[in-house]
Amino acid sequence: MKFHFLTIFPEMINAYIGEAMLKRAKDKKLADFSVINIRDYSKDKWQKTDDRPYGGGPGMVMTPEPILRAFSKLKTKQKVKVIQLSPSGKMFTNAIAKKMAKQYSDVVFICGRYEGVDDRVRKILKADEYSIGDYVLTGGELPALVMSDAIVRQIKGVLGDQTSLEEARVASPRVYTRPETLVWKGKNYKVPKVLKEGHHQKIEDWRAKQKLI
């Protein structure tokens, strides 16, 4: 599965995909990533990618041509999903991440900035708009990385053990490791007794209750 990021800030993307799980997914050849600088496809001598909005209003709007030129240079397979990040888009969920991991060979993220992207880009590329939460960020790079992280971990083999998927097991938000008794500023903080007894059913029951708290 390949993820394509169209952005004017490529280093924001490169810094994240070069570490941890996404890097392991690439090393295992289970996922691949391409980062495209939209400015490289601007014909303006200053590599300008924005202009004033029609109808007036504050801010600037990303112009369509550089984005469309960048998209036309992508090497994709048949099952391509084009995503435009927008605060007004459909809410992204784990269920959607699972579906995308199974259905698509390529996911293309159009990372908007300023007051948004000229809407003709969405229409021409038949892009779906997605949001990662009920708040506004300064650009689409962070949402694109959040979505790609959620999708990649659903690809079989990326995590090594599919039971590592939190949603696939009885997980608790309360987790403990060594030492058994933590001494901090004169106080003792102990691991819950049930986790040390080895009674698997009791442990699973305890974990299930923690999820309800």
Image (cartoon, rainbow, N blue to C red):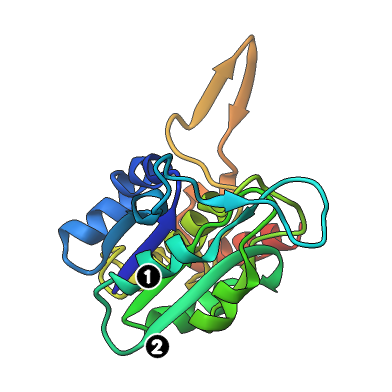
Q: Which mark is residue 49?
A: none
Q: Position of residue 148 (x, y in %)?
A: 43, 63
| Quarter of the image with the C terminus in it | bottom right
Q: What's the residue type where badge 2 is placed?
A: Gln
Residues marked 1 and 2 touching at CB (< 8 Å): no
Q: Which is more toward the observer, 129 or 92?
A: 129
Please give the name of the residue rendered at 40% of the width and 49% of the height, measured from the top-left corner: 39
Mark 1 residue crowding within 10 angstroms, few (<14) / some (14–19) / many (20+): many
Q: Is residue 61 left or right of residue 75?
A: right
One can see residue 142 in this view: yes
Please give the name of the residue rendered at 62% of the width and 51% of the height, measured from the top-left corner: 51
* Cα–Cα gap, marks 1 and 2: 20 Å
Q: Which is more toward the observer, 3 or 178?
A: 3
- Quadrant position of residue 46: top left
The residue where tag 1 is placed is 71
Please give the name of the residue rendered at 56% of the width and 59% of the height, measured from the top-left corner: 63
* 114 to 55, vertically: above or below: above
Please give the name of the residue rendered at 69% of the width and 51% of the height, measured from the top-left corner: 52
Q: Position of residue 91 (x, y in %)?
A: 68, 71
Q: Which is more toward the observer, 152 or 39?
A: 39
Q: Which is more toward the observer, 77 or 148?
A: 77
Q: Which mark is residue 103?
A: 2
Sequence-wise first label, 1 or 2? 1
Q: Secondary structure at mark 2?
A: helix
Q: What's the residue type where badge 1 is placed?
A: Phe
One can see residue 92 in this view: no
